[in-house]
Amino acid sequence: MSTAQQRFSTGTALVTGGAAGIGEGFVRHLAALGMTVVVADIDEQKAVEVADAVIREGAAAEAYRIDVTDADAVDEMARYVFDRYSSLELLVNNAGVENAGLLWEVSIDRWRKVMDINVDGVFHCLRSFVPRMIEAGTPACIANLSSVGGLNSVAVQAPYIVSKHAVLALTECLHQELSLVKAPIQVSAVLPHSIRSQIFLAAERDAPTQNETANAVFAAMQRANVESGLDPVVAAEHMTEAIARGDFWVFSNDEVCTQMAANRGRQLLELAPPADPRVMLNKMGVSAPA
């Protein structure tokens, strides 16, 4: 029996952004382990579809429509979950969006939306769930989704990269502060790499850019995502096992993500400037601007 089977075979989990991509992978795997999973997503129809599919497979799930940028709505969701289930053993803060384009060309509204969802959405969930989890007094876990983008800098994705650095810093602070109050709550920073999803297509649809380089980068990333991205359920199984072990750093691909962390460590130790973006563009088969 795996560590995840031992630790997450009962209890309740809530996954934000649980109706698609990485979030759906977590929902399906946690439900298969035996947890009751709340599929929290702004897309109610997709959340219902995922929850219904889980139920048809003989597991337990419930759809809950939530806009994580609405602090009051998140607080009501936390109140509902604890009224219904009495406790929450695993909170996965996954909801997030991407963005393409040069930093100075990003609209104020889009910047705010990325930060509202990717950063404030995590804060709202922590602010509402952590006090209730502490009061319950039972062992629990919080897994916040940063990204390998939280370890480095990448051209033409600045809002997303900034948000994922912020989530990583927030998660490290949360780990320290829960330790201060001796709460029985484990914290894990989840840093995925290339898991199949619609995140790049959604960014191109919701916030199109006229920048040719940014569009070429996102097209290349989408192709790579389809061709070599991990299946969300397979990735969730690997990451859930690390969470169950009690790991703080949780990767979807241990080798790739550890190498990225090492690269970041060397950059900081050497006080080196960020990498030349043309190197990344060349690896992706994208022509640099003339």
Image: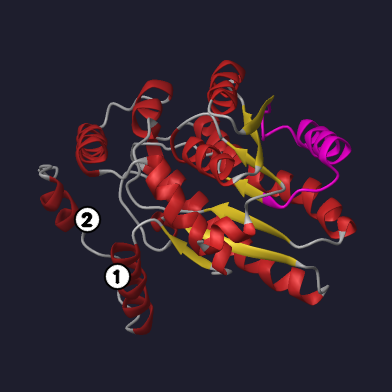
User: Residue 13 placed where, x, y %?
Assistant: 67, 44
User: Residue 45 placed where, x, y %?
Assistant: 58, 15
- Report which quarter residue 289 is drawn in: top left
In the orientation shown, which residue stands out farthest toward the top?
Answer: 45
285, 260: nearer the viewer: 260
Cβ atoms at labels 2 and 1 below 8 Å apart: no
User: Residue 158 placed where, x, y %?
Assistant: 40, 47
59, 52: nearer the viewer: 59
> Is residue 167 covered in magenta?
no
Of helix, strand and loop, which one carries label 1? Answer: helix
State the quadrant of the C terminus.
top left
Q: What residue type is labelled 2?
A: Pro
State whether residue 21 is above or below residue 125.
Answer: above
- Tell me which colouring the rendered structure shows: secondary structure
Q: Which mark is residue 277?
A: 2
Magenta span: 65-90
Q: Which amino acid does label 1 sit on?
A: Gln
